[in-house]
Every structure is written in C-alpha cells, then in structure tokens.
Image (cartoon, rainbow, N blue to C red):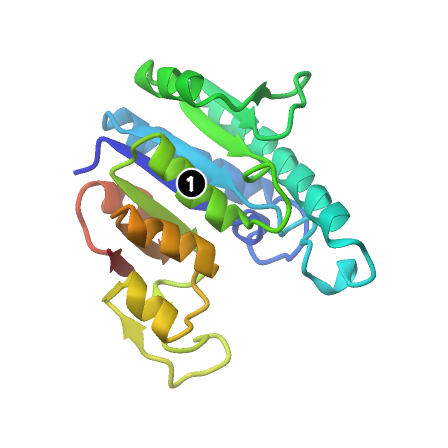
Amino acid sequence: MYKRVLLKLSGEALAAGSGFGIDAVFIHQVATEIAAIHALGCEIGIVVGGGNFFRGVAQQAIDMDRVAADHMGMLSTVINAIALQDAIEKLGLYCRVMSAIEIRQVAEPYIRRRAMRHLEKGRVVIFAAGTGNPFFSTDTAASLRAMEIKADILLKATSVDGIYTADPKTNPEATKFPQITYSDILRLNLRVMDAAAVSLCRDNNMPMMVFSMKEPGNIARVIQGETLGSLVTP
C-alpha cells in the first residue's frame, strides 16, 4: 500500500507503560515489526521522542531555561534512537541513526540527500534530536522529515488507538474519530500533535494514521492498507 513511510514513536511508547527508561522486551517487539514491514519492501524512516527520559515542558524542567531543557530532551531522543538501532540490527537489518545535533561519534549528521540514499538502499533510518532547534516538538520533526523524505504517509504510533474527542484514559465518554481533517483537529483543539506539526501536514497534503502500538502487528496492517485507529486527511 505504501512504498515509503515515516513512523513516529513516542518515548513513552518505548517505556511500555513504566513511565521511565526503555522496556527491552517492547523495543525488540517494535524492531521485529519494523523488520516485518521492511520485508514487504517498504522504506522506513523513524522519528523517536524522548519523553521517557526528559521532557522540556514537564514538571521536572519547570525551573529550567526552556532552551536548555529542550536540548536535554533532544539528547534523550538520541538515547532512544541508539537503543532502537541496536534492536533492529540484531535482526539483520542495516540501520542508520541521523542526528539533527552533531554527535559524530554515535550518529551521522542529518543530511537530507544522504538520508534519501540510505532509504533507497534499503536501510532503516532513525532521525534523532528532533529538528535540532528548541521550542519544536518531535511531532513537528516527524512532520518535517516526512515531507523531506517524500513519505507516502506519516504513521503516529501511540498508546491510544486513534483520535478521540477527549482523553479516553480519563474520560470514558470520549468518542473516536475514524477519519478527521487537520483543520478540524485545529478547530476542536484536539491534543494529537502540536499546532505547528498539524499545520505543516495540512499545508503539504501529508496524510497521517494515528493508531495503537499495543497490539503486535499493527504497523504491518496499516502498511498493507487496513484502516486502524484514525486517518487524518488534508
């Protein structure tokens, strides 16, 4: 169904419910799913978050300078990227970590043409350190990288199986949107992604699927055309 995708994984997803750190069992499950869709012939770019280690707007950063806190958040995404790279390579795939902040000892610097070449050669590419700029979330980085690599769709894997009118974890009356537009997300002020990421996808006609990572095999199902979760259209 899709030749090239950009998969957004949150740091919280990699923690698998524990809230902090990386769940070794879950990250290997994610790597196995990535290997499965790679075997289908799909080119895969991944953006990882860092909320399982540090979040610049969280309570733990309340007394910090926002720029310093965001830089710490970017570095935490590099930790997650290296962990995911290790799990993917153990399955026999070639994987590259490309960082928006230069850390040449552990990751390649992000260069768009080089990233495209890696994808064309069948390598999995993990984009770390967000956009490299403070005040921008990893959701915005995912939207940006999806445009840059000319992905067919942006896949946002979360702990919730779609987009709801309210947080289904706290509001049992929340209803799910099987399909919604980016303009409606902004109009209804739904907390799916930040407004910059939503506007970027809308203005560049990038479709997005929001689905749950909790059920094994969901990524492959989406790649093969199943409508899981919520489809967001321009």
The C terminus appears in which quarter of the rendering? bottom left
Q: Where's residue 127, x and y in %? A: 50, 32
Q: Is 81 left, or right, of 106 in this rendering?
A: left
Q: Where's residue 211, x and y in %? A: 34, 56
Q: Residues within 10 Å of mark 1 (few under 14, many from 20)?
A: some
Residue in view at x 21 percent, y 36 percent: 2
Question: Does residue 215 appear anywhere in the picture?
Answer: no
Q: Which residue is mark 1?
A: 144
- 165 to 120, vertically: above or below: below
Specify the quadrant of the image occupied by residue 129: top right
The N terminus appears in which quarter of the rendering? top left
- 14 to 79, vertically: above or below: below
Q: Where's residue 147, x and y in %? A: 34, 37
- Of residues 71 and 88, the one nearer the viewer is 71
Residue in view at x 29 percent, y 46 percent: 204
Question: Does residue 222 appear anywhere in the picture?
Answer: yes
Residue in view at x 49 percent, y 42 percent: 141
Residue in view at x 65 percent, y 35 percent: 79
Q: Is 135 left, or right, of 164 in this rendering?
A: right
Give SS at disc 1: helix
The extreme right residue here reads 63
